[in-house]
Image (tube, helix red, strand yellow):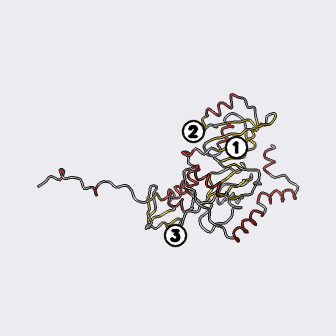
Amino acid sequence: MTDITEQPLNPEQEQQPASGEKLQKVLARMGLGSRREIEGWIGAGRVSVNGEVAQLGCRVDSLDQIVVDGRPLKRDLNTEVIRRVLIYNKPEGEVSTRDDPEGRPTVFDQLPRLKQGRWINIGRLDINTTGLLLFTTDGELANRLMHPSWQMDREYAVRVMGEVDEEMLERLKEGVMLEDGPARFTDIVSSGGEGINRWFHVCLLEGRNREVRRLWESQGVRVNRLKRVRFGPVFLGPELPVGRWREMTQNELDILSTEVGLKPIRLPEATVAEKEKQKRQARKPSMHQARVVRQNKQGTRPRGNDRTRK
């Protein structure tokens, strides 16, 4: 009788690599959200697979039944990923959330409606920050643009109030310790201003909450104007008014996709009716413009301007 310890291992008993794809990657590719956002859903118990609450690290294949917030998902394996990107010029006073419990206007209010999927915001801007925001229907693109490993730098135009010297600028480039860890600007360029109000263009590689403001505040100066003007290879051009959006062209989209290692995808062909609808939406006054007009009729300044003059 052969000792069982001397028997050769059965190759089928050896550990096999996990099959399927990570759940958050599948849902991101469907355009439901970014991977980071979906990981939050999984952690909160909002996603189930085959009748059981999903766990982080769960993998799924084409036969698994996925339910999000009690709603079963229809998965058509033959449907190609739709990759669209919007460039939005955010006004002051809008919040970067889909639904606001306080009823404030959100950055999603003006965006065109989608037949399938939804718009995913690539990063956020706080309520008092204006400028460039990107939205996409492709969760994988959103994830790569926001992930630190792809080194997407953000550029801001910032006006600070207070005395600024060269030693301070060097400290901000070398790095300072904030409450959530070390942070720094990768570049700082003076861009005008007089007295205690001066403009700078700053770049950083992260998107932590209020990071630009907190970096300057760590040096005893205050930010009274902040506008994002670039995200990676995407610039906010003068042709896009505050409160308006435009869709990226095929060439712009291909450049952005290649920048994060994704294969370019052709934009879906829009029908004549869809093109006309987009033109009407583009001509429609934004909520920002409507507020300014209403405040002018009432003989008051926009609240954003009042705040910056205090």
Circle nearer the viewer, 2 or 1: 1
Quadrant location, the N terminus: bottom left
C-alpha separation, residue under disc 2 versus residue under disc 1: 21 Å
Where residue 98 appears, x then y in whole percent? 64, 59
Identify the secondary structure beneath mark 2.
strand
Vertical arrangement, residue 199 with respect to residue 276, above or below = above
Among the two numbered marks 3 and 2 on one chain, the one whose residue lies closer to the N terminus:
3
Q: Where is residue 287 in the image (x, y as percent from the top left)?
A: 76, 60
| Residue shown at the point (78%, 36%) measured from the top left | 192
Residue at which label 3 appears? 74
Closer mark to the observer between disc 3 and disc 2: 3
Query: The residue under label 2 is which amino acid type?
Result: Gly
Q: In the drawing, does residue 147 fall left or right of residue 236? A: left
Taking the image as drawn, is residue 60 in sight?
Answer: yes
Q: Nearer the viewer, residue 99 or 271?
A: 271
Q: Give residue 199's quadrant in the image.
A: top right
**Label drawn at residue 181:** 2
Mark 2 / mark 1, whichever is N-terminal: 1
How far apart, in angstroms, are the residues tagged by discs 3 and 2? 42 Å
Q: Mark 1 points at which residue?
A: 156
Tell me the element at label 3: loop
What residue do we see at 56% from left, 45% from top?
148
The vertical placement of 51 against 251, above or below, is below
The amino acid type of the residue labelled 3 equals: Lys
As helix, strand or loop, the secondary structure at mark 1 comes to strand
Q: Residue furthest top?
A: 167
Tell me the number on the disc at residue 72.
Answer: none
Q: Where is residue 10 in the image (x, y as percent from the top left)?
A: 25, 56
